[in-house]
Image (cartoon, rainbow, N blue to C red):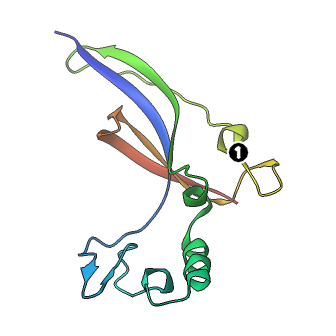
Amino acid sequence: MKTFITAALCLIALQAHADNNIYHNGWIDFNKNGVKDVYEDSRSDIDDRIKDLLGQMTVEEKTCQMATLYGFDRINLRPGESRTVKFTILPEDLEILDRDMHWTVEPGEFEVRIGSSSADIRIKDSFTVI
């Protein structure tokens, strides 16, 4: 009997979120921090709400790059069998366009996830770009 495993390498920008109820009397705690932020307050000035929201967003959130698949390999394994799979992450793999439309690598912490699918992550680690 063969087991089919797809090893996938995915970098995720790290985010910390508390796991609590977001619905409060009169407002929704979108970022789950337990505090009514300016952008969550519908009575605040719209320009102040936008400025507050953008100030709290990471570069990854602003560019919609919360997760990116950088490589995969399909591996056929028999029960009890193991193999080593290697992926190389190059600086250009982490590049995004900055506000001046130049490719750049933003500093920050990146999480590496490896598993049989995005729903079955078996290994997690992280690295920091400075």
Q: Residue 120: percent from the left, percent from the top?
A: 28, 38
Q: Residue 96: percent from the left, percent from the top?
A: 70, 47
Which residue is drawn at the image coordinates 55% and 49% (left, top)? Answer: 65
Dividing the image into 4 quarters, which one contains the C terminus? bottom right
Q: Residue 68: percent from the left, percent from the top?
A: 52, 41
Name the foreground residue: 14 vs 58: 58
Q: Is residue 81 left or right of residue 101?
A: left
**Displayed quadrant of residue 89:** top right
**Displayed quadrant of residue 7:** top left
Identify whether 95 is placed above or below 16: above
Q: Residue 30: percent from the left, percent from the top?
A: 38, 73
SS assignment at label 1: loop
Which residue is drawn at the image coordinates 50% and 89% (left, top)? Answer: 44
- Residue sitting at the far left: 1
Q: Is residue 22 left or right of residue 51?
A: left
Identify whether 53 is placed above or below 93: below
Q: Which residue is mark 1?
A: 95
Identify whether 34 is placed above or below 100: below
Q: Is residue 108 left or right of residue 35?
A: right
Which residue is drawn at the image coordinates 62% and 60% (left, top)? Answer: 59
Q: Is residue 10 left or right of residue 128?
A: left
- Residue sitting at the far top: 1
**Displayed quadrant of residue 117:** top left
Name the amino acid, label 1: Glu
Which residue is drawn at the image coordinates 45% and 50% (left, top)? Answer: 125
Identify whether 66 is placed above or below 85: below
